[in-house]
């Protein structure tokens, strides 16, 4: 529970405690007097104001919490979509990486074979260079591979042997020369053939090496992308869990607010009941006071009439006695005096 919730709960508890105290005070006396009735009504009004303010705060908190849940739900849905999107990308990258690995496995076998073939061809060329009797002049690429020059020289020697008139020494010298040139030409052809093979294998090796480098670059690229997506997925998963936890706390806060609202409604209903009862008591007291006031007024009016009747009777008796005295003395009586003597006995 937040500090604000604790404060509101404290206020609500204070309000409900005050309301409960008022209930006890009000119910102590079945017929409170006017002062007690006013004091109780003021206490109820104060408690009612406190509870209504507390209810207003709870409703506002509930509204904000429900709005917060809607926002959290939207963020959770967005996070889920991002997680699904990243998972799709991850699956796609893993599929591509699998194809690259398969290609790497296939090409790597060829790469090793070419590498071994290249080393074998190179060793063969070194062996030929070692066995070759061409001398230092044949070690240069120009001399070693000048097969055209050697071929022409061999043709010329053979032509000389066949067309010229030679002595036996000259013929033996040309035959030996022919063998020497033929040997050089053969060695050059063998070396050239090996070098052609070497260059061909080297070309294939370099081409396949470029393919392997590109494959490893792709593996590295896919690996980096997969690592980045995994990192992003971890972040999104943690975010989703934190959003779930925040939503659970918000739902708990809403339930607490609902429970508080239920208690407040109970207190408000109790206050409303006490106010209605006190109002009924007040109305009954007011009617009682009005009735007693009217009865007192009637009593005073009756007393006034009795007093006036008594005064009138005394005055009548006095006038009648005076009329009887005059009649006894033989004095002349007026009509009103005659009425007093012979008329009604009451005024």
Image (cartoon, rainbow, N blue to C red):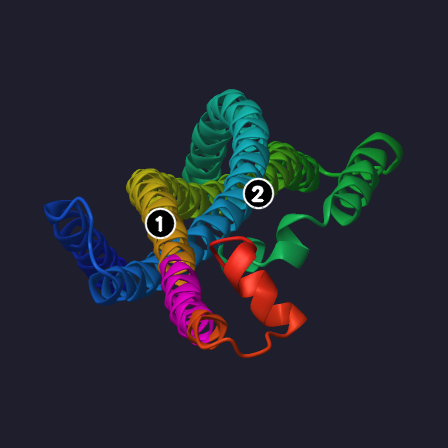
Q: Is residue 196 above or below residue 294?
A: above
Mark number displayed over residue 74: 2
Labels in figure, total: 2
- Is residue 245 shown to the viewer in this render? no
The residue that appears at 35% across and 46% down in the rendered structure is 268
Front residue (pair 224, 9)? 9
Q: Residues within 10 Å of mark 1 (few under 14, many from 20)?
A: some
Question: Which quadrant of the view contains residue 207?
Answer: top right
Write down the region rendered in magenta.
299-322
- Residue 212 horizontal/vertical position (percent): 54, 38
Dominant SS type (magenta): helix
Residue lying at the far front of the rendered structure: 330
- Residue 40 horizontal/vertical position (percent): 24, 60
Front residue (pair 290, 50)? 290
Q: Let me know if residue 319 is in the magenta part.
A: yes
Q: Let me know if residue 270 is in the magenta part.
A: no
- Residue 18 horizontal/vertical position (percent): 18, 58
Q: Secondary structure at mark 1?
A: helix
Q: Which residue is mark 1?
A: 275
- Residue 315 horizontal/vertical position (percent): 43, 74
Front residue (pair 1, 300)? 300
Q: Earlier in the sequence, mark 2 or mark 1?
A: 2
Residue lying at the far right of the rendered structure: 163
């Amino acid at each position: 529970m937040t500090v604000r919730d604790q404060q509101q709960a404290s206020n609500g508890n204070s309000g409900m405690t005050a309301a409960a105290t008022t209930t006890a005070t009000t119910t102590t006396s079945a017929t409170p007097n006017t002062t007690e009735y006013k004091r109780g009504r003021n206490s109820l009004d104060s408690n009612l104001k406190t509870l209504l303010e507390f209810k207003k705060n709870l409703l506002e908190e509930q509204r904000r919490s429900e709005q917060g849940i809607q926002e959290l739900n939207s963020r959770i849905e967005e996070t889920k979509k991002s997680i699904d999107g990243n998972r799709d990308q991850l699956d796609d990258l893993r599929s591509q990486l699998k194809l690259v690995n398969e290609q790497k496995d296939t090409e790597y076998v060829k790469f090793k074979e070419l590498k071994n073939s290249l080393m074998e061809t190179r060793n063969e060329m070194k062996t030929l260079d070692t066995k070759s009797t061409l001398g230092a002049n044949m070690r240069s690429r120009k001399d070693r591979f000048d097969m055209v020059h050697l071929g022409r020289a061999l043709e010329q020697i053979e032509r000389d042997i066949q067309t010229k008139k030679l002595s036996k020494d000259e013929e033996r010298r040309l035959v030996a020369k022919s063998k020497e040139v033929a040997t050089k030409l053969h060695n050059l052809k063998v070396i050239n053939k090996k070098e052609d093979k070497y260059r061909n294998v080297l070309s294939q090796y370099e081409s396949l090496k470029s393919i392997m480098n590109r494959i490893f670059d792709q593996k590295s690229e896919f690996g980096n992308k997969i690592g980045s997506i995994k990192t992003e997925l971890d972040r999104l998963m943690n975010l989703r869990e934190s959003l779930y936890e925040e939503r659970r706390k918000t739902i708990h806060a809403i339930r607490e607010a609902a429970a508080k609202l239920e208690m407040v409604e109970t207190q408000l209903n109790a206050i409303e009941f006490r106010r209605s009862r006190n109002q009924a008591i007040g109305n009954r007291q007011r009617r009682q006071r009005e009735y007693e006031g009217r009865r007192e007024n009637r009593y005073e009016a009756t007393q006034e009439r009795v007093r006036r009747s008594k005064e009138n009777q005394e005055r009548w008796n006095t006038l009648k006695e005076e009329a009887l005295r005059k009649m006894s003395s033989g004095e002349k009586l007026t009509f009103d005096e005659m009425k007093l003597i012979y008329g009604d006995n009451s005024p």
